[in-house]
């Protein structure tokens, strides 16, 4: 449908005016914007009458009016330096002519000599000149010839604004570039000049290329930084849901939530994601990683293998009990890499066996033949530069190229993904990037494509001054958001503890296929991996072997896997055989030397079935009882009697303790698993 011409719009407005009050009202409405210069001229003429009455023949008034006229003209010239030269000159001439005539009229009288003629000719001429200027500022064809010549200043004089959208803190303009004269790259080069002309930060001006036309772009200006205040994590976005649901990690400057997708979705045309996380020290990269991991660990069909050989448990510590395999030294990290390479073919064979082209949520469910499902697997490598440095710069290339089809996502986090740390093949295979503040613009090219940088993305403008600020360029995210600044959520330690506790029963366990392949590749480094205790439980870390982690009898284990065995210790099997030979099976048993009286088993306490709300109320009453007894310190074990009495699991009780912490009724102490009771009036 074609747009109406200016003449057609005029006729429509005229008909509307005639139908709602007549042509006079319409003409007055159209004349309103042009009245100020005329009103100023009439006011100047009328004001000259009382001025002449009071100041005629007064030498002091004459000198004062003359000086005021000169000062007013000079002030106008000075104030107009920020505008165009034409507007500055026009304003100065108008003020000089008006103030000079008013001074002469006040002294000699408005009807003296040529003053009447000058007024009735000069005042309308000046008013009309401003009306003409105002009319010429309007461009019915949409050309960007607005006051100030902004686009002209930055080299886009012939660009036309075809559509504009203005929000409270965001202005968007669709620009039509002159065909054959300017390109999208030319418009991108003008962004720094636009930011300077608008007096905003470099990140506040962005450009989005139109994929269907090389002569159209969209300019976005965000004058105020709405991300400057930290944004606390609002909680799980899909508690107990699937890893196929979006993982919420932050918020964009316009309030839209920043999300990422790990598994692929053929219906949406989205591949599984491999992610490069990059940011200099102090940019908030690790905090953002914890936010994403905490969100992932609230899902029912995903397991996480995580490595940090540089900082050990300093970063991953709060989430270790929820991570299926945590490699906190280089030996375990190398084993994890080997295991990831080994599980890929095993998992793809399983997917092919059950008719899956790629991983989907149904894979995590029990299959038709009764075999257990296979959860999604995420391999998260913090401080990956150390791993690459002590192995090979191509150590992740094979995983990045092959893991997507096996329901595995690879995440590599490091400060600088330069060519001497990460091979170009690995970077090309990762595909997605989550970039925080960087040291310089060269570092930005290691993680962001040229079109994202040309669109205005500038992580080097933040450096480490704005922790949490980031760009997210990933599968499933519209390209319009790739160059839009976001800020990752800030997660408190109490929230991380709550995630570990509350979703312990929901979280997926390792599947037999992945466990068997990992055990063959990593041996006891996987099978006897450290399992960390749930916060608040009086259990030390263990190295128990799960039922799904079998060790094949034909597995060749390295000698280093048995470092805990004393080589000088005698063979225990031989000693056992000698002890059996020394026993005479025909000998009579000795007479008992004493009798121990055993007490009768106490009667079992009657269990009471409670609803979840009643169970929570019982926990609160128990806390009130402790407080009434004068106790100030409690442990989760103090509440464990509640499990047997009301049929609740221990993880549930632990999660309620975590809720008390979040509600302010309990406070953490320096001792792990020990909490201080806060009086209810203080908590409120």
Image: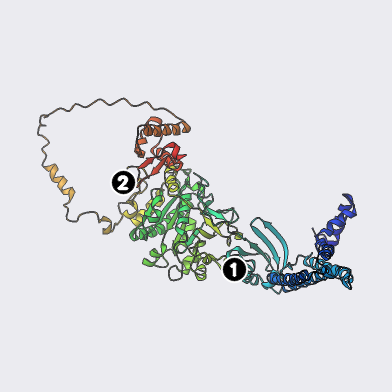
Marks 1,2: beta carbons within 8 A: no
Can residue 323 be seen here? The reply is: no
Question: Which residue is labeled 2 in the image?
Answer: 540
Q: Which quadrant does the N terminus fall into? A: bottom right
The quarter holding residue 591 reads top left
Q: Position of residue 337 (x, y in %)?
A: 39, 60
The quarter holding residue 312 reads bottom left
Q: Looking at this view, is 105 or 83 the one in front?
A: 105
632 on left or right of 430: left
Question: Which residue is labeled 1 in the image?
Answer: 454
Crowd rating for badge 1 (residues with CA inside 10 Å; few <14, some 14–19, many 20+)? many
Q: Position of residue 555 (x, y in %)?
A: 31, 55
Count of numbered marks: 2
Q: Position of residue 459 (x, y in %)?
A: 53, 65
Q: Position of residue 274 (x, y in %)?
A: 49, 59
The quarter holding residue 660 reads top left
Kindly identify which numbered label has been placed on residue 146: none
Crowd rating for badge 2 (residues with CA inside 10 Å; few <14, some 14–19, many 20+)? few
Q: Is residue 585 above or below residue 371?
A: above
The residue sitting at 86% across, 56% down in the picture is 28
Q: Earlier in the sequence, mark 1 or mark 2?
A: 1
């Amino acid at each position: 449908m074609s747009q109406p011409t200016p003449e057609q719009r005029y006729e429509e407005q005229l008909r509307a005016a005639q139908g709602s009050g007549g042509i006079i009202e319409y003409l007055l409405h159209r004349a309103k914007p042009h009245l100020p210069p005329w009103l100023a001229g009439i006011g100047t003429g009328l004001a000259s009458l009382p001025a002449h009455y009071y100041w005629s023949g007064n030498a002091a008034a004459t000198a004062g009016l003359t000086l005021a006229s000169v000062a007013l003209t000079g002030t106008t010239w000075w104030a107009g330096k920020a505008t165009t030269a034409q507007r500055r000159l026009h304003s100065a001439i108008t003020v000089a002519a008006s103030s000079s005539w008013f001074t002469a009229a006040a002294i000699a009288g408005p009807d003296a000599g040529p003053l009447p003629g000058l007024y009735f000719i000069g005042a309308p001429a000046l008013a009309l000149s401003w009306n003409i200027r105002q009319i010429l500022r309007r461009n019915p064809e949409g050309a960007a010839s607005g006051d100030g010549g902004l686009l002209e200043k930055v080299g886009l004089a012939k660009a036309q604004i075809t559509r504009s959208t203005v929000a409270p803190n965001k202005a968007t303009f669709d620009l039509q570039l002159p065909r054959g004269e300017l390109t999208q790259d030319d418009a991108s080069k003008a962004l720094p000049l636009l930011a300077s002309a608008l007096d905003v930060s470099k990140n506040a001006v962005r450009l989005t290329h139109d994929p269907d036309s090389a002569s159209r772009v969209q300019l976005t200006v965000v004058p105020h930084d709405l991300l400057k205040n930290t944004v606390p994590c609002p909680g799980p976005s899909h508690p107990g849901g699937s890893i196929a649901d979006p993982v919420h990690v932050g918020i964009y400057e316009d309030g839209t939530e920043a999300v990422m997708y790990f598994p692929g979705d053929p219906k949406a045309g989205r591949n599984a994601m491999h992610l490069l996380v990059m940011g200099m020290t102090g940019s908030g990269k690790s905090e953002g990683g914890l936010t994403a991991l905490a969100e992932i660990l609230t899902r029912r069909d995903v397991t996480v293998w995580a490595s940090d050989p540089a900082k050990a448990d300093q970063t991953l510590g709060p989430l270790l009990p929820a991570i299926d395999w945590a490699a906190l030294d280089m030996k375990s990290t190398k084993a994890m890499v080997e295991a990831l390479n080994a599980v890929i073919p095993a998992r793809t064979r399983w997917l092919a066996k059950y008719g899956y082209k790629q991983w989907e949520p149904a894979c995590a469910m029990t299959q038709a033949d009764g075999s257990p499902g296979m959860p999604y697997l995420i391999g998260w490598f913090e401080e990956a530069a150390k791993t690459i440095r002590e192995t090979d710069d191509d150590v992740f290339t094979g995983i990045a190229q092959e893991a997507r089809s096996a329901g595995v996502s690879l995440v590599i986090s490091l400060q600088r993904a330069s060519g001497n740390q990460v091979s170009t093949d690995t970077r090309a295979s990762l595909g997605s990037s989550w970039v925080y503040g960087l040291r310089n613009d060269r570092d930005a090219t290691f993680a962001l494509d040229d079109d994202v940088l040309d669109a205005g993305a500038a992580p080097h403008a933040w450096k480490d001054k704005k922790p949490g600020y980031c760009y997210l360029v990933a599968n499933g995210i519209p390209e319009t958001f790739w160059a839009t600044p976001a800020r990752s959520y800030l997660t408190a330690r109490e929230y991380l503890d709550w995630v570990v506790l509350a979703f312990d029963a929901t979280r997926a366990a390792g599947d037999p296929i992945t466990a068997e392949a990992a055990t063959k590749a990593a041996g006891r480094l996987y099978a006897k991996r450290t399992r960390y205790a749930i916060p608040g439980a009086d259990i030390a870390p263990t190295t128990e072997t799960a039922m799904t982690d079998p060790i094949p009898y034909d597995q060749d284990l390295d000698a280093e896997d048995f470092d805990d065995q004393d080589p000088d210790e005698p063979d225990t099997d031989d000693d056992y055989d000698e002890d059996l030979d020394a026993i005479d099976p025909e000998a009579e048993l000795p007479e008992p030397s004493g009798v121990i009286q055993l007490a009768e088993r106490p009667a079992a306490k009657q269990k009471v079935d409670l609803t979840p709300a009643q169970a929570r109320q019982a926990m609160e009453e128990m806390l009130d009882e402790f407080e009434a007894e004068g106790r100030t310190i409690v442990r989760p074990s103090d509440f464990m009697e509640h499990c047997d009495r009301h049929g609740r699991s221990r993880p549930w009780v632990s999660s309620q303790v975590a809720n008390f912490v979040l509600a302010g009724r309990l406070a953490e102490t320096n001792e792990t698993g020990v909490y201080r009771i806060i009086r209810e009036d203080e908590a409120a």
